[in-house]
Amino acid sequence: TLDSTITAGKVEYFSYRSRSTDDSGRFSFGNVARGDYRISVFANGFSKLAITHKLRSPSDQLQLTLTRP
């Protein structure tokens, strides 16, 4: 999942998106503006991973590794 809180003047918006991975575990989110985002990744049999990432460029790439509990 990808989520963030966006402030526009006195109004706050909550943005939330989710994706499933392909067979290789890859996923992507298109059309994402620069800013701070929380990325959460989970799969059955693994510990959930949640990070905060500052998106600086539409071409940013992250490699996330899940571990077994």
Image (cartoon, rainbow, N blue to C red):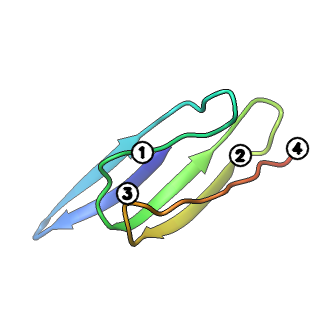
Disc 3 from disc 2: Cα separation = 18 Å
The local secondary structure at tag 2 comes to loop
Amino acid at dot 4? Arg
Disc 1 from disc 3: Cα separation = 13 Å
Query: What's the residue at 77%, 48% (across, down)?
Result: 66
Whole-percent x, y for residue 37 in the image: 43, 61
Q: Which residue is mark 1?
A: 29
Q: Is tag 1's residue or tag 4's residue first in the polypeptide sequence?
A: 1
Whole-percent x, y for residue 61 in the image: 54, 59
| Relative vertical location of residue 11 with respect to residue 30 in this rendering, above or below | below
Pointer 1 with pointer 2, Cβ within 8 A? no
The image quadrant where one finds the C terminus is: top right
Whole-percent x, y for residue 48 in the image: 71, 46
Q: Nearer the viewer, residue 37 or 63?
A: 63
Decide if residue 19 is on the left or right side of residue 44. left
Amino acid at dot 1? Phe
Q: Is tag 3's residue or tag 2's residue first in the polypeptide sequence?
A: 3
Question: For residue 7, what is the image quadrant?
Answer: bottom left
Q: Is tag 4's residue or tag 2's residue first in the polypeptide sequence?
A: 2
Q: Which residue is mark 2?
A: 48
Give residue 4's mark.
3
The local secondary structure at tag 4 comes to loop
Which mark's residue is nearer the viewer, 1 or 4?
Answer: 1
Decide if residue 48 is on the left or right side of residue 30. right
| Relative vertical location of residue 16 with respect to residue 39 in this rendering, above or below | above
Question: For residue 10, what is the image quadrant?
Answer: bottom left
